Amino acid sequence: MIRVLLADDHRLVRAGLAGLLSTAADIEVVGEAADGRQAVDLSVTARPDVILMDLSMPVLDGIEATRLILDHAPSTRVIALTSFADKDKVSDMLASGAVGYLLKDSEPAELLAAVRSASAGGAPLDPRVAITLLPNRQPTSVVEQLSSREREVLALATQGLANKQIGRTLGIAERTVKVHLGNVFRTIGVSDRTSAAVWARDHLPEARDRGDGSPGF
């Protein structure tokens, strides 16, 4: 039996999901959370195998809740179930440890299949979401290959902020910052923060030096 926890701040959404999942003989809903903090707490007491996690919730959003859950229960399989499909949110959610990402207009059969896949070790990803992670086939510049979030992280790193400070400024986890910086380094072809800062000073308007000739370190 696959034990599933539902995390969504809309009661009707949770009720609909619970009704759908109850039609599957091999799936059991073991809890419902109305916000990210409840999801973290229920992940301890209900011990779910799979969590269907909304992104936009009060108290804690789905990204931070996922990070906290996997810190104490790394074997839990989290699937984002949300209306957002933009690259930044997808990247942040996957960086927090989610194994799958579905949109709320998915077909019922797709949702059931995703729960079973995640429980078995798979990584269910909506094709509409997967395409946002593909590199632009005809980029006009390296800069355009960076997401807006990656540019924000790079600009703050160029100002000399540590990963924890960047995370606090942007409201994301420190390890998410590390993932974004790693993506930036690979995209622009550098291996360290200093080289990235020099590149950013020459290519990103938001990361120009502060007038003293230094890149902010």
Image (spheres, rainbow, N blue to C red):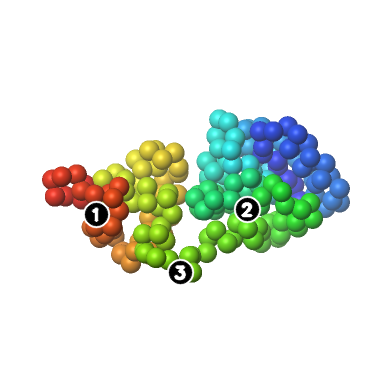
Q: Earlier in the sequence, mark 3 or mark 2?
A: 2
Q: Earlier in the sequence, mark 1 or mark 3?
A: 3
Is any part of residue 194 visible from this angle? no
* Residue indicated by mark 1: 201
* Residue indicated by mark 2: 101
Q: CA distance from mark 1 to mark 3?
A: 24 Å
Q: Which mark is residue 138?
A: 3
Question: Is disc 3 placed on a helix, strand or loop?
Answer: loop
Q: CA distance from mark 2 to mark 1?
A: 35 Å
Q: Earlier in the sequence, mark 2 or mark 1?
A: 2
Amino acid bearing label 1: Arg
Amino acid bearing label 2: Tyr
Amino acid bearing label 3: Gln
Q: Where is residue 161 drawn, in percent x and y?
A: 29, 44
Residue ranking furthest to the bottom: 137
16 sits left or right of 68 in the view: right
